[in-house]
Image (cartoon, rainbow, N blue to C red):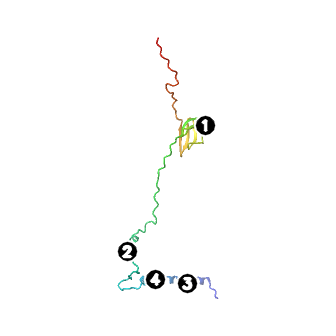
């Protein structure tokens, strides 16, 4: 067996590839020039009709049936764009029913007296939670709370002085005396 140089091997490989490309191009060219009616042609029953008729003959649909296809816009996107997100207004935050009744502010001893939505009075220090609101700070007559993401400052509610009912608890009036 005769050894071939690398240069000769490459030339032979290039020549074989070129021959293969020419063969493929020739077969494609012949297929392009061959009339399509000659391939798979059905036997004709009548010289005037190009297609055989009868119950077993294929029926061709009218061209108007395909109008939807050839009138389609081929430049449109393949998928419809996603719908724009619906922006909904945030629901209003619930009304805070917590009331500040009083405060005690001394070094190391800070408390707030709160009335809850249930009417109970509770003593609370900063950092505790009452009725869903976190007490952040307590000052003289004020308290800062965080409720539903909002920071609110509550002030001590001024309560009217207690009224005594008229006519109760008073000594009876002395009858008038005439001289």
User: Which quadrant would residue 17 be assigned to in this image?
Assistant: bottom right
Quick one: SS at disc 2?
Answer: helix
Q: Quadrant of residue 80?
A: bottom left
Label 4: state its secondary structure: helix
Judging by the rendered image, the residue that carries numbered circle 1 is 110
Q: CA distance from mark 3 to mark 4?
A: 23 Å
Closest to the observer, 55 or 52: 55
Residue at mark 4: 31
The answer to whether residue 70 is left or right of residue 112 is: left
Disc 1 or disc 2, which is closer to the eye?
2
If you read the primary sequence from the N terminus, does the residue marked by circle 2 or circle 4 appear first?
4
Q: Nearer the viewer, mark 2 or mark 4?
A: 2
Q: Which mark is residue 63?
A: 2
Would you call the spot at circle 1 few (<14 residues within 10 Å), some (14-19), or many (20 or more)? some
Can you give x and y, in whole percent of width and height, for residue 135 in the image?
57, 41
Which secondary structure lies at badge 3? Answer: helix
């Amino acid at each position: 067996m005769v050894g071939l140089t690398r240069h000769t091997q490459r030339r032979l490989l290039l020549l074989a590839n070129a021959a293969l490309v020419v063969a493929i191009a020739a077969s494609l060219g012949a297929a392009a020039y061959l009339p399509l009616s000659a391939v798979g042609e059905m036997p004709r029953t009548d010289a005037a009709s190009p297609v055989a008729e009868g119950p077993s003959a294929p029926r061709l649909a009218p061209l108007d049936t395909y109008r939807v296809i050839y009138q389609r816009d081929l430049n449109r996107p393949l998928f419809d764009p996603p719908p724009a997100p619906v922006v909904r207004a945030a629901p209003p935050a619930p009304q805070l029913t917590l009331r500040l009744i009083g405060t005690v502010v001394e070094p190391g001893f800070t408390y707030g007296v709160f009335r809850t939505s249930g009417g109970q009075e509770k003593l609370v220090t900063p950092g505790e939670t009452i009725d869903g609101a976190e007490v952040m700070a307590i000052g003289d007559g004020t308290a800062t709370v965080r409720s539903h993401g909002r920071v609110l400052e509550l002030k001590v509610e001024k309560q009217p002085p207690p009224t005594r009912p008229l006519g109760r608890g008073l000594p009876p009036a002395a009858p008038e005396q005439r001289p």
